[in-house]
Image (cartoon, rainbow, N blue to C red):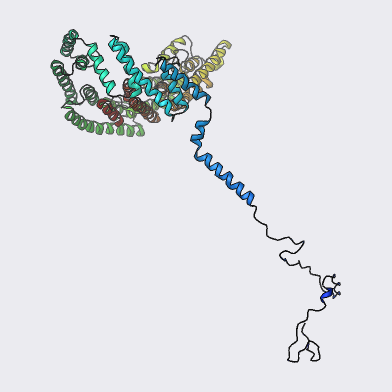
Amino acid sequence: MSRKRDLNDPGHNGNGRTEPKLGNLDQLDRPHAPAPDDGLPKITVEPAYRRGAPGVKSPYKKPNWFLIVLIAVLLAAVGGLWFNQSRLRSLVPRTDFDEVLHRAQVALQQGHLDGTDGTSARELFEAARALEPDNDAARQGLNDVGRAEIARADAALQAGKIDEATQALTNARELLGGGSDVDRLTQEIAKARVSSGQTDTLIAQAQQALSDNKLDGPDGAAALYQRVLAAEPDNAVARHGMDQVGDAMAAQVQKALTANDVATASAGIDRLAAVLPNYAQLPTLRASLSALQAQANSALTDAINQGNDALRAGRIDGDGNDTALAHFKAALAIDPNNAQAKAGLGQVAQALVVQANAAIDAGDTDHARQLLDQADALAPGSADLVAARARLGQPPAPAVLPPSAGNGGAAGAQQQENNSALPTAQLTGQQQIQIADMVSRAKQAAARGDIMSPPGDCAYDLYRGALAIDGNNQQALAGLQALPGEVQQQFNDALRGGSLKKAGSLLDALNNLEPGDAAIAISRQRLANAWFDQAEQQLDSGDRDNAASSLEQGRQLQPNDPRLREIMARMQGGR
């Protein structure tokens, strides 16, 4: 508080200013006397921090340099391990890999190059590469096996063992993918197979085959002339003979083009290109085929669209050409393998089954039988058709299925031909036990993938047999109608697992069980793509024979797929 200055104060200097005083410093270390109670609230004030004051801790902690250095060292160590993991991994003992690699090297040194029992050098090096795909030792080992096969082929050829030399050369080609030694041995083996005395015989056989219009195939004129040319590339008679083969094949293609037979013309051009990829008339023939295909595709598209329109309008079948059945049949006449036209016929069959069920509900059993017979001619394996026959009280008719689906339908119907369809109330105890057993076995067969075969023991036959005894059995009906979904799932699993042949069998079964399903076309394309992928992989590894087989499987599924042409061009060009 301010107060009025006293001029008589000793601290007053007379100049209007009061000098500061420190007071009695002798009492500085003594404790302060308690402040008088002035009635105001108490306030506790922390003592100010003074550097170096005894007993007073600094509010700021010193950095722990040891901890910081330790963290930095740990981070550096982790980073080093991460960036050098490949090198460090190579220092870790690899018992399995090293053991397999050692066994492979021993087998190579012993000359045990190839086999099927898992002990050959090739099998063991491939197993080592499977364990470590990027390992250089495994890759080099396979290359060494290929070089050893070249040496074995040379030795076998010198000893006159042509078959052994051929097998060794095949193995070398698969491992090395080609090369000058492979080309040299190929020509030398061909020469060894065709001696001077055999050349005349082969030419005579080729000329006779050409006269008989037997152009391709293992005993055809083209194959025989090519055997001569493999041994004697400059043989003038064989060269002229190949030109004659090309002319004869071109004439067949031209005949098919004139008849507007797109399928035959396309297949003929493929055969000609495989035999003589550089034949002069090939570009002209292909251009003519493209023009014909454009016309045929237009007519095919129109027929399919008209068939779909008639189907939506309810013109399923009957007299005249403006029915779904007539239009889809016209489409198949243009392209017998067209998946959309086949699916259209399946939809016609389904529509007939729907009409038959409606006739059954109305009590018109005669008309229902007629409709089911018509559907049976279009889709004999349809699950809905079998279920409708069971409702009608007819034993399932013997199904005439395509060869790919097996003979299961006919066998199953024959197995139950003596069993009449009886109402559930009239079933004997023995029949009920028999039905339950057949339904149980059918479910087990479906789980195994035995859908349409083996005859009598497949899911399709067993469900049909149960319905032949009791057309109203709900478990058999539900099981039969659920088969398409189960088959589709098994098809997907087989395709993912690379089991392409099994997937093809399941696709055939699906096509018989549910021929009108548009999703089948998608599954067909997926399977064709898988075969084409496999053909390309086999071609990349030098396995031309298996590549050709895979390509043929894909061609059967999708004969007009652009990839088919591309892979065929690669094979013909030797790439």
| Percent x, y of residue 323 | 31, 29
State left or right for residue 73 relative to residue 260: right
**Image quadrant in which you'd find residue 368:** top left
| Percent x, y of residue 338 | 31, 27
**Identity of the residue drawn at 84% across and 71% down:** 32
Q: Is residue 364 visible?
A: no
Classify 75 as above or below 203.
below
Q: Is residue 178 visible?
A: yes
Q: Of 9 and 161, which appears nearest the observer?
A: 9
**Image quadrant in which you'd find residue 3:** bottom right
**Identity of the residue drawn at 72% across and 63% down:** 52
Classify 65 as above or below 470.
below
| Percent x, y of residue 412 | 45, 13
**Quadrant assignment for the C terminus:** top left
Classify 466 as above or below 83.
above
Q: Of 426 and 565, which appears nearest the observer?
A: 565
Q: Of 472 and 119, which appears nearest the observer?
A: 119
| Percent x, y of residue 189 | 26, 14
Outermost residue toward the front in this view: 26
Classify 121 as above or below 18.
above
Q: Of 505 and 283, which appears nearest the observer?
A: 283
